[in-house]
């Protein structure tokens, strides 16, 4: 029994340490899941959101049906890069701590609404379209969004701490360089998601008729 208690305590300590080290990531993941669920279960209640979801899918199909591989890569990369840039800018201010979770929640809400629209309006075709065309690149973008948002929140908190009296001295210039390097590395995965998006669109998009 004593060994069991010791193992349980060690497991709890490891879980607690992980939660403390990744508190921003856990918070943002929770916000993302909540936003996604709200988007799915409230679909149809907000006309503006429904119209946006419908427009997004129609625009996506019409543009990509006529675009070549490189154009799709470029457009997809620009869209995701703008998302990343917005997170970067938010993280460069004190308000990032408040703005970034709201931004993550809004993004997941819209994704949930688009998924709900496809499921409810197009049934099995919509489910297949979402699973094959949208989901693969979206998974990469979501991971990128959560990691970049975590880094942005960390830097935003760091900036806020500098303004506090009796705070420990921090080399902001060095920290900002590290912040920029991390976002440059993350942007490589944004490019990867754009390539995946283009490959799937070029090979499978014309197979679907919604």
Image (tube, grey):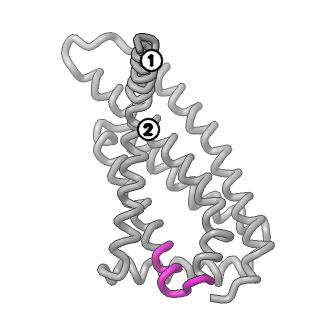
Mark 2 Cα shell of 10 Å, populated few (<14), some (14-19), many (≥20): some
Residue 183 locus on image (x, y percent): 56, 38
Instruction: For the residues labelled 1 and 2, say whether their Cβ atoms are less than 8 Å apart.
Output: no
> Seen in the image, is 168 located left or right of residue 67?
left
Q: Which residue is mark 1?
A: 4
Taking the image as drawn, is residue 42 in sight? yes
Name the foreground residue: 128 vs 187. 128
What range is drawn magenta here? 115-125
Q: Is residue 70 above or below residue 96?
A: below
Q: Which mark is residue 160?
A: none
Residue 37 locus on image (x, y percent): 39, 63
**In the image, what residue occupies the spot 38% across and 48% down?**
30
Q: Is residue 39 above or below residue 16?
A: below
> Seen in the image, is 120 located left or right of residue 209?
left
Q: Is residue 11 magenta?
A: no
Query: How many badges with numbers are in the image?
Result: 2
State whether the magenta stretch is mostly helix, strand or loop: helix
> Seen in the image, is 204 located left or right of residue 135?
right
Q: Residue furthest left?
A: 165
Q: Which residue is mark 2?
A: 25
**In the image, what residue occupies the spot 55% across and 84% down?**
123
**In the image, what residue occupies the spot 58% across and 80% down?**
126
Residue 31 locus on image (x, y percent): 36, 50
């Amino acid at each position: 029994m004593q060994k069991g208690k010791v193992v349980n305590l060690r497991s709890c300590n490891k879980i607690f340490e992980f939660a403390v080290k990744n508190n921003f990531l856990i918070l943002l993941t929770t916000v993302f899941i909540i936003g996604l669920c709200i988007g799915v279960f409230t679909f149809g209640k907000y006309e503006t959101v429904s119209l946006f979801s419908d427009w997004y899918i129609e625009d996506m199909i019409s543009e990509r049906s006529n675009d070549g591989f490189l154009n799709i890569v470029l457009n997809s990369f620009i869209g995701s890069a703008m998302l990343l840039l917005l997170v970067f800018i938010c993280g460069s201010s004190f308000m990032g701590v408040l703005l970034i979770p709201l931004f993550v929640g809004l993004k997941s809400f819209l994704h949930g609404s688009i998924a709900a629209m496809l499921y409810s309006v197009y049934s099995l075709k919509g489910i297949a379209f979402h699973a094959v065309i949208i989901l693969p690149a979206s998974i990469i973008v979501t991971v990128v969004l959560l990691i970049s948002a975590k880094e942005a929140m960390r830097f935003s908190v760091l900036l806020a701490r500098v303004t506090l009296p009796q705070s420990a001295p921090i080399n902001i210039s060095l920290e900002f360089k590290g912040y920029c390097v991390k976002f440059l590395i993350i942007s490589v995965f944004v490019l990867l998601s754009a390539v995946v998006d283009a490959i799937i669109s070029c090979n499978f998009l014309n197979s679907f008729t919604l």
